[in-house]
Amino acid sequence: MMAEEAKTRIRQFVLDLGVDDVGFANIKDYSSPRSPKIETIFPTARSMVVMAFKEGSNCESPSSSIAMTGRMDLMEFSRSCNYKLTRFIEREFHTPAMSVPVSYPLDMSAQTSGLVGEVSLRHAALAAGLGNFGRHNLIIHPRLGTRVIFTAVLTELDLPSDPPVTEDLCIDCDICIESCPVGALDEEGKTDMMKCLGNSQPYGIGGSIRFWRKFFASSPEEQKRMLFSEDFMRNYQAQMIGFQYTCFNCYTSCPIGNDL
Ligand code: B12
């Protein structure tokens, strides 16, 4: 089967799942210097199918539970699409396919501290012609804008990349920079990860370490009080259900492509 015919069949399958957009990147065109080489994940992979999902209005809610619910719904849907697409490729093309994480699990070694994904989905989206980087270091999709989440499936199919988006989609309005409450975007081309992490995931690993260090240094009375505090309850909840974002500002403030 010709590569273009395979792309057409895969594209149609993905769009029929209700996914907003899909692009293809040949592994040769994927370049993310800080990420692991694709051959360390799937040695015989030749291409990736990258899916783009518009994030719903939940992310604008002042309620962090409602904002995070939108992300959790999206992550669940995107993971289901990843599974369905890997099975479609394996069944229809008799060739292996592998799904990569939308967010986590992540490598938690001292070298990366959980900040580098197996596949950089922004660089994958860039290579698959699904958009380009804005001043906020996020990928802007030509139609869906900034509020878009990506996932990918690696395949042995030797598919050519879709054409890159050549038009600069960022209008340099700097609203994203001004909207960051901790100045994590002040330096161009770099997100200050620790500033972003501390603000956007207060109940992540940093919060948990701070809590337990204080706990072990406290008196029995203080420990009892701490175990019934909101801080402990929120840390506990985050550990049960996964990473919880309390900030979406650089993502929601971007004026590009906010049509629903
Ligand atoms: C770890 C992680 C984080 C960390 C670290 C982010 C980082 N700088 O890498 C923290 C917790 C800080 C974070 C924050 C956020 N994240 Co995050 N995160 C990830 C994750 C899991 C891995 C990223 C990774 O591997 N980074 C390591 C390498 C690739 O980074 P790097 O080499 O330093 O590359 C950077 C620079 O070189 C620069 N860059 C490279 N080339 C170019 C070119 C140009 C022109 C420019 C301007 C910049 C630039 O931008 C890159 C990104 O910062 C991905 C999912 C995934 N597997 O990709 C999601 C992901 C990147 N996150 C995402 C989102 C939405 C967010 C948040 C908005 C939080 C939220 N509420 O959802 C913020 C945005 C912060 C920001 N503006 O940068 C989305 C981005 C979608 C999009 N439209 O681009 C992703 C892709 C998840 C997904 N499945 O869609 N994230």
Image: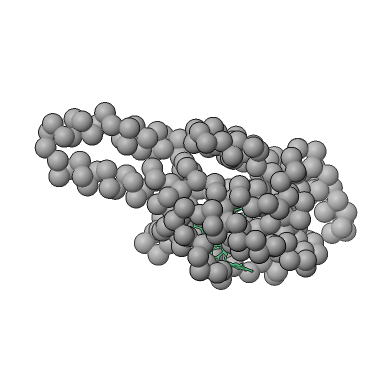
Is residue 35 depicted above or below 239 in this figure? Answer: below
Q: Residue at x 20, y 30 (%)?
A: 225
Question: Percent position (x, y) of residue 173?
Answer: 65, 61
Question: Percent position (x, y) of residue 23?
Answer: 76, 55
Q: Between residue 195 and residue 10, name the one nearer to us.
A: 195
Q: Quadrant of ligand 1?
A: bottom right
Q: Residue at x 73, y 50 (%)?
A: 257
Left or right: residue 260 compared with residue 63:
right
Q: Between residue 54 and residue 39, name the one nearer to us.
A: 54
Is residue 170 depicted above or below 88 in this figure? Answer: below
**Total numbered circles:** 0
Q: Residue at x 46, y 48 (%)?
A: 200
Is residue 194 depicted above or below 213 in this figure? Answer: below
Left or right: residue 67 compared with residue 169:
left
Q: Residue at x 43, y 62 (%)?
A: 112
Question: Percent position (x, y) of residue 189?
Answer: 56, 69
Left or right: residue 228 compared with residue 169:
left
Left or right: residue 58 compared with residue 192:
right
Specify the quadrant that holds the N terminus: bottom right
Specify the quadrant that holds the C terminus: top right
